[in-house]
Amino acid sequence: MELIDISIVNVALSHMSGNLGATLEDTSWVITAYAIANVIIIPMTSFLTTNLGRRNYYIGSVVLFVFCSFMCGNSSNIWELVCFRFLQGLGGGALLSVSAAVVYELFPKEKQATASAIFGVGIFLGPTIGPTLGGYITEFASWPWIFYINLPIGVLVAFSCYMLLPEPVLKGKKTAVDWTGIGLLATGIGALQTVLERGQAEDWFDTGYIVILTVVAVISLASFIYWELRVSNPVVDLRVLKSKELAIAAVLTFITGIGMFTSIYLTPVLSQRLLSFSPSQTGVLLLPGSFVALLVLVLSGKILQKGVSPVLIVLFGFICFIYFNWSMSQISLNTSSTYISIALIFRAAGMAFLTVPLTTLAISSLEAKDMPQGAALNNMMRQLGGSFGISILNTYVARRMGVHRTDLISNITEYNPIATERIHNLTKTFQQRGFDQSAAYGRAMKVIDNTVQKHSLLLSYIDGYLFIGIFFALAIPLLLLVAKRRKGPIVIASADH
């Protein structure tokens, strides 16, 4: 539910905009608000669990998520929707980490690998099926139902947890609330996330409020790091980053977040805008990879259980993802759905090989009391990676599209016989349809311009896939820093502890 809601609204923005009488730019805050809330609350999970009790915090978060889902669907204006979307994100941010902790603690050690892998299916499938599900709901019902579908599931979850979920033995002592840390974290992450989400749409530093928010983010986050390293009861214990394994796993998780979210953002857009696939065809593209992911997640858990280093599994996951990006860089306007579906299988396998081993690597050198904090930080890096990746990808694709358009137009001259023949034939075709010479020529040039636009977009998307693949390739050497022989059994972590 939580991860589906990250991406389910993407395809409904235009419908929301028209229905609520808002601009598309204002409506995009529906996405931004949820992402900001998620990233703010995730690193605070360990602190809130300790002070509120895991059972109370989890059930309360479910109730908040469900209530705000209902209120989002009932919103009568855009800013009411944005407000409840932010609160929904605060509730949803707790679900991922705390759910994983429940899985990790309630299953015996011999079943943790399988349980973690099955749990990982949700982490993988959520962002994957979100846009497709949102498209179907928006097309066959109306946009409020992308929020209402959370209600029956959420009510069932809350009731089940109330009846069945035990409160674990308290592993930490309640501490005074670090209000300063919470304030600095919320301000810094909120400002940073807004810059990443809105930068491209607002021409980055040519817009005043983007410049101001960038300064606020830098000062707030720097102050937050300084404060948290000095205070005795930090809301986020940054000292756990002394662990080399956690620090490197956090970077690799950041790269994984870039790949996970950019690929599921770019591929459906490409399929529908350039290859003319319908929403249902786009959804079918993702299905084979989803089934493969289920098998690979279970396989990776069993391999870890047999003592194989998570570093080797992470390496294989990165290789799969690099191959996916390379495959997608070879597409054309005639590429078949089968080709894309096969490429997406490698993406699915790569993400599945990364899900459990990266968290296992992250907490492998931590003491038991620090594991929830380490997992929460690792979790936050995935979300930040997704926001950073989509932001930088949008900027890169837009700029590459301008470059490709200029290159292609430079070939349309009177000295290029292919271009002049194409224009002549198109003009003649429109004349045969009843247009005079001038109007026929104008329509012919418009066809040429549309063709240039389409090919420019295709080439920029190809560049985007290669660009993301380079991130994965450059990150591989980091694995050498944590590649070592392990003594004793490997602790299997749930997908997000």
Image (cartoon, rainbow, N blue to C red):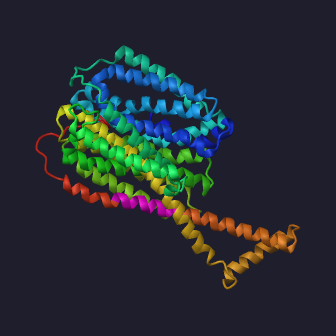
Examine the rendering and report whether any part of residue 151 can be seen: yes
**Residue at x 17% of width, y 41% of height:** 365
Assign the C terminus to one quadrant of the image.
top left
x%, y% of residue 254? 35, 49
Decide whether the magenta segment is chiefly helix, strand or loop. Answer: helix
Q: Nearer the viewer, residue 223 or 30?
A: 223
Residue reaching furthest to the top? 163
x%, y% of residue 122? 41, 36
Q: Which residues are magenta?
A: 459-472
x%, y% of residue 362? 24, 43
Q: How many marks?
A: 0
Examine the rendering and report whether any part of residue 119 can be seen: no
Q: Nearer the viewer, residue 336 or 229?
A: 229
**Residue at x 56% of width, y 25% of height:** 71
Q: Nearer the viewer, residue 223 or 147?
A: 223
Q: Where 437 sits versus 355, above or below? A: below
Looking at the rendering, which quadrant does residue 160 occupy?
top left
**Residue at x 65% of width, y 33% of height:** 142
x%, y% of residue 87? 47, 30
Q: Is residue 253 magenta?
A: no
User: Left of 377 or right of it: where is 79?
Assistant: right
User: Left of 230 or right of it: where is 298?
Assistant: right
**Residue at x 77% of width, y 75% of height:** 425
Looking at the rendering, which quadrant does residue 46 occupy?
top left
